[in-house]
Amino acid sequence: MDLVLFGPPGAGKGTQAERLVERLQIPQISTGDLMRAERKSGSELGQKFDSYMSKGQLVPDELVIDLFAKRLGQPDAAKGAIFDGFPRTQAQAEALDGLLEKMGRTLHKVVVIDVPTDHIVDRITGRRMDPATGQVYHIRYNPPPPDVRVEQRADDTEEVVRKRDESYRRDTEPVLPYYEAKGLVARVDGLGSLEEVTERIKAAIGA
Ligand code: ADP
Ligand code: ADP
């Protein structure tokens, strides 16, 4: 099954993708995580990614699509994957269709996790990450265990979050009609406990 988790930054895409991995037995592919890993390696490409990410701008399509295509081609994604944070533009959506088509696959659903803008800043500025495992927490809604040392992402400041939310509204949300025309969109309320949201997604995808 190939599934897109769609929604503004902070909607809970990464959190829910992680929870669905076990249930669906397919990997999560997060372009944000892939880019952070590349950045950590200190490569030239990683520095290029950072020049956009640190400002809350989208990384250019050709770079993202190339990175994504390489990951999708790995053996663990042969039976499907959960796409978290990809596609974010119309060009990426079309590239995804093309890549899946070549493998004889089509998207099962695009699940939009709806979270009102006034919750976004609170969710993102409270987000913390365990750099060792990539596990995501929230200082109030999903606090890390006391023995886990967490970090805050450099782009999780209020100023950068506002830019990311703007780019979601401007470049990413307009992709939805493309998927609506294909009858693939399922909307899920993203407010409530992590468990509640997971149950809503499972119901929406028939899992
Ligand atoms: P969030 O989980 O808050 O939505 P991500 O980890 O998905 O954030 O993305 C962090 C940053 O990485 C984005 O602000 C953007 O700069 C870049 N990025 C991630 N995925 C994409 C993509 N599909 N297209 C362009 N840029 C991306
Ligand atoms: P995204 O990948 O869409 O940017 P994340 O999964 O990283 O979003 O979640 C953003 C922040 O919100 C994290 O700190 C996460 O722990 C928290 N969060 C996720 N889902 C919920 C929820 N249902 N209620 C409260 N906080 C949540």
Image (cartoon, rainbow, N blue to C red):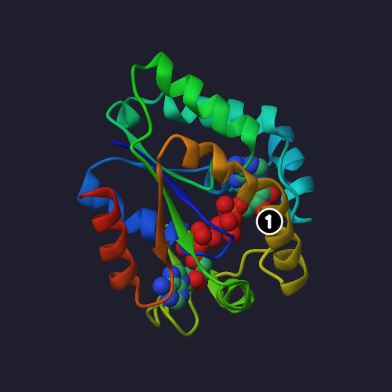
| Image: 151 above or below 94 | below
Q: Position of residue 173 (x, y in %)?
A: 62, 50
Residue located at (49% from left, 37% from top): 181
Q: Is residue 84 left or right of residue 63?
A: left
Q: Position of residue 101 (x, y in %)?
A: 41, 18
Q: Is residue 94 left or right of residue 164?
A: left
SS type, badge 1: helix
The quarter holding residue 127 reads bottom right
Residue located at (71% from left, 41% from top): 59
Q: Position of residue 200 (x, y in %)?
A: 30, 63
The quarter holding residue 158 reads bottom right
Tally of numbered discs = 1
Q: Position of residue 151 (x, y in %)?
A: 57, 69
**Quadrant of image for the N terminus:** top left
| Image: 74 above or below 27 | above
Residue located at (56% from left, 42% from top): 177
Q: Is residue 108 left or right of residue 33?
A: left
Q: Hey, which residue is sitting farthest top in the picture? A: 102
* Camera-side residue of 124 and 35: 124
* Camera-side residue of 38 and 126: 126
Instruction: Determine if residue 76 is in view.
Output: yes
Amino acid type of the residue that numbered disc 1 sits on in the rendered structure: Arg
Residue located at (74% from left, 34% from top): 44
Is label 1's Cβ within 8 Å of ligand 1?
no
Instruction: Determine if residue 39 is in view.
Output: no
| Crowd tier of the residue under label 1, counting other residues whose Cα lies within 10 Å: few below 14, some 14–19, many 20 or above | few
Q: Is residue 93 left or right of residue 83?
A: right
The residue carrying mark 1 is 169
